[in-house]
Image (tube, helix red, strand yellow):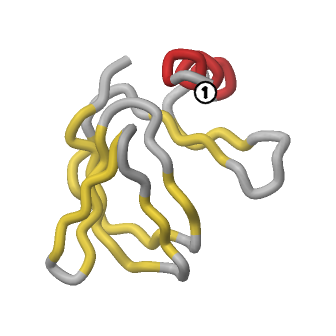
Amino acid sequence: MNRSALRQLVARHAAQDGLSPTSIEGLRLFRVTHPVERLPAVYPASVCCIVQGTKRLYLGGVAYTYDADRYLCATMPLPVEAEVPVATP
């Protein structure tokens, strides 16, 4: 599946900003259409893939950026700070 088709599929199932559940157990979609400032959070054990835009995670004083070319794999719950520096509708 190419990126354009993947973006269309995600847009169809995550029509609004925020977290959207899916019919696949454990799979959730998160959509934002504007940048989000750096905020504290706890990431659950997960694999995070970005379809469009950029997300940045701060852990132990180190910034990790992930986007359509890089994913994040958290093998256990992590106390982090996160931001969405690049997002568009």
70 with respect to 75 (left or right): left
**Image height check: is 31 above or below 48?**
above
Residue 19's quadrant in the figure? top right
Asked whether 2 or 87 is in front, the reply is: 2
Residue 87's quadrant in the figure? top left
Provide residue 88's location: percent of width, then percent of height.
31, 22
How many discs appear?
A: 1
Q: Which residue: 71% across, 50% down?
A: 27
Q: Residue furthest front?
A: 1
Provide residue 80's location: percent of width, then percent of height.
33, 73
Provide residue 21's location: percent of width, then percent of height.
72, 43
Give the structural element (helix, strand or loop) at label 1: helix
Q: Which residue: 21% across, 41% down?
A: 85
35 with respect to 23 (left or right): left
Q: Which residue is mark 1?
A: 10
Within 10 Å of disc 1 (Cα), the crowding (few <14, some 14-19, many 20+) is some
Asked whether 62 or 32 is in front, the reply is: 62
Residue 44's quadrant in the figure? bottom right
Asked whether 86 or 75 is in front, the reply is: 75
